[in-house]
Amino acid sequence: PGSLFLSHMATLLENDAKRMQSDKMKAPQAVVAGVEAPGVGYGAAGTAQIEHDPPYSAANFCCPSPLSFALSLLCPFSWLGSCRVINEKEGAMLLTWGKFSSVVAEPGCYILNPCGTALSKVSTKQQTTDLPNVKLLDLKGNPVVVSGVVFWQVEGIKAASLNVQNVYQYVNTTAMATLKQVVSKYPYEDDDDGAGAGHSHGLSLKTEAMQVSMELKEVLQQRLAHAGVRVIAFNMTDLSYAPEIAQAMLVRQQAEAMVKARKLIVKGAVNISEDAVQQLEEKGLTMSAPEKAKVVTNLLTVICGESGATPTLQLN
C-alpha cells in the first residue's frame, strides 16, 4: 500500500508540473471589474483589477509539504477523516502550516492531508448588502437620509480570504464610506437659478439617480478589487431630507411652488389684458390712454386676486 501511495503521489506531482508549464506559456490576462480582458496588462490607469486565483493543485492537497507527508505516513489512521466536500458556488483556500498552498473552486469531494493543513471556505454566490437609513450631508450641507443596496460577488478566493479579515463586514464598511463620499458631491435638488451648478454641473441626487449609481459602483469597485470582490451594482433605494429639516424644506418647496404659480397667473393676466384692448380697438371702439389703463387694471385685479372681485360702480 505504501508503494502504491508513493506512486500515486508521483503521478500527481508530474501532472501538476506539466499543467504549470503550460500555464506559463499562455499569455497573461487581466481581470477588469470581474471580466477577463485579453491584452490588458495590470497597472492600467482608471481600471479596477481583481487578482487571479492560482490554478488548483491536487498535489498540494495530498502532499502539501514533506513534514505533512511524513506525519501522515506515521499516523495512517488520520486519513480516515481526510475527505472534504466543496459545494456548488463555493470556493476554498488551503493553508499549510500557516502558509498559502492552493485554491479550489470546482465542486466535488477532495482528499486533504490531515497534518498541518487548514481549509477555509468562501461563498461565491451573489450577495446583497443593505445600507438602511444612513444620515449624510449633501453638497450644500443639508442632512439627508439615504438608503442603498450593494450587489456583489467574490471572484478572488485567495484575496477574499487573506487580504481582509471578514469580507462581508469589509464590504459593508467600505460601501458606507463610498456612499458618504459620493453623496457629498451632489445637492439634494438643484436650484432653478443654477446656484449649485458650479459644483455639480447642474446634477442632483433627486434627478440623476442613474449617474450617481454608476459613480457609486465605480468608486466601490476600486476599493474592493484587492479583496477579490466584483461589484455588480450599487443603487440608492430611498432618498429624503432628515426629519429635523424636513418641515423647513417643505415650507421652502411650498413657497417656490407659490412663486411659480403667481408668475404664471401674472403672465396670463397680462396677455389677456393686452388681447382685450387690442380686440376692442379692432372692433372700432376708440379708447383713451386712461381708459385703456382702467380696463387693464380691472382685468389684472380680477384675474390675479386671490378672492372673487366685488364690482363697484360710480354713480354721478
Image (spheres, grey):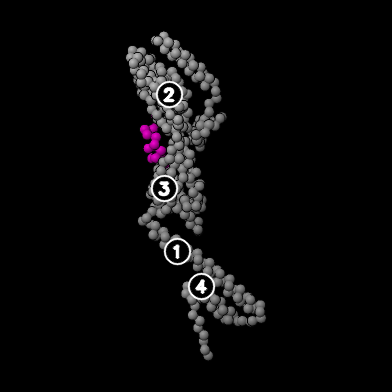
Percent x, y of residue 204: 48, 51
Secondary structure under the numbered disc 1 in the rendered image? helix
Question: Sequence order check: which comes first, mark 2 or mark 3?
Answer: 2
Q: In the image, which disc is placed on residue 147? A: 3
Q: Nearer the viewer, mark 1 or mark 2?
A: 2
Residue 193 in the image: state x and y as whole percent.
50, 58
Q: Among all residues in the image, which is located at the extreme bottom? A: 316
Q: Earlier in the sequence, mark 4 or mark 3?
A: 3
Q: CA distance from mark 2 to mark 4?
A: 83 Å
Please tell me whether mark 3 sits on a helix, a strand or a loop.
strand
Magenta-drawn segment: 162-175
Of 289 and 164, nearer the camera is 164
Q: Which sits earlier in the primary sequence, circle 1 or circle 2? A: 2
- Label 2 crowd (10 A; few <14 / some 14-19 / many >=20): few
Say what secondary structure mark 4 lies in.
helix
Q: Residue at x 48, y 57 (%)?
A: 191
**Amino acid of disc 3:** Ser
The label on residue 255 is 1
As drawn, the label of residue 304 is 4
Disc 1 residue type (three-letter): Ala
Q: Are marks 2 and 3 in contact (CB under 8 Å)?
A: no
The amino acid pointed to by label 4 is: Cys
Residue holding disc 2: 109
Between the residue at mark 3 and the residue at mark 1, the CA separation in whole angstroms equals: 28 Å
